Amino acid sequence: MTEMKMPGDLTERDDLERIIRVDHAGEYGAARIYAGQLAVLGRGSKGDLLRHMKEQEQVHLDSFGKLIAQRRIRPTALLPIWHVAGFALGAITAAMGEKAAMACTVAVEEAIDQHYQDQVARLGEDETPLRDTIEKFRLEEVEHRDIGLENGAEQAPAYKLLSGAIRLGCKVAIAVSERV
């Protein structure tokens, strides 16, 4: 017996488009966050560390950009917003200090880690290369989270409030970018 499709249910193609669209948007936002942090802290003691993480995010962004083109998937219409919002988030947290910038990194990467885990679980065997790519990138995001923790993220002023607000913002951005 075939499973009955209900109105509003996503096809496999719809789900795949959402996955690639939101991952492209997220990596774009992450690259912009690091650009904002580097604008403020790039000449300081954390500059090389931030550049390393930004370079990895750029590889992720380039990979999802290629998938958008190869699979003919419409990117999110919100890229101009993520362009400004990502840079602003990075610059503002960096202006609050190195520990606040690291708190931002931890919050973003925790949200992305869970998001990528959910996606890996949803992808079927026919999408093994995509699943492997997402898992590789997830592990690099976890590395970024760990770098943030090792560099005093939890000592940032109002850490729990700051990181909670950023995680919530990430979840909202994910939900919206999948659809718009």
Image (spheres, rainbow, N blue to C red):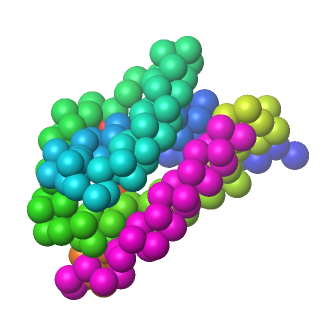
Helix, strand or loop for the magenta stretch, by majority: helix
Total numbered labels placed on residues in the image: 0
Residue 22 is situated, as x and y percent measured from the top left of the image, at 43, 41
Viewer-proximal residue, 119 or 28? 28
Viewer-proximal residue, 31 or 10? 31
Q: Is residue 63 above or below residue 103?
A: above
Q: Is residue 19 above or below residue 69?
A: below
* Residue at x-position 76% and y-position 41%: 124
Q: Is residue 38 visible?
A: yes
* Residue at x-position 12% and y-position 62%: 95
Q: Is 136 one of the magenta-colored residues?
A: yes
**Which segment did they paint magenta?**
132-158
Viewer-proximal residue, 132 or 74? 132
Residue 75 occupies quadrant: top left
Q: Is residue 168 visible?
A: no
Q: Is 78 one of the magenta-colored residues?
A: no
Q: What residue occupies the far right of the structure in this picture?
A: 1
Residue 26 is situated, as x and y percent measured from the top left of the image, at 39, 44
Q: Is residue 45 above or below residue 34?
A: below
Residue 137 is situated, as x and y percent measured from the top left of the image, at 58, 45
* Residue at x-position 73% and y-position 32%: 129
Q: Quadrant of the C terminus?
A: top left
**Is residue 131 shown left or right of residue 81?**
right
**Is residue 93 shown left or right of residue 175?**
left
Residue 107 is situated, as x and y percent measured from the top left of the image, at 38, 68
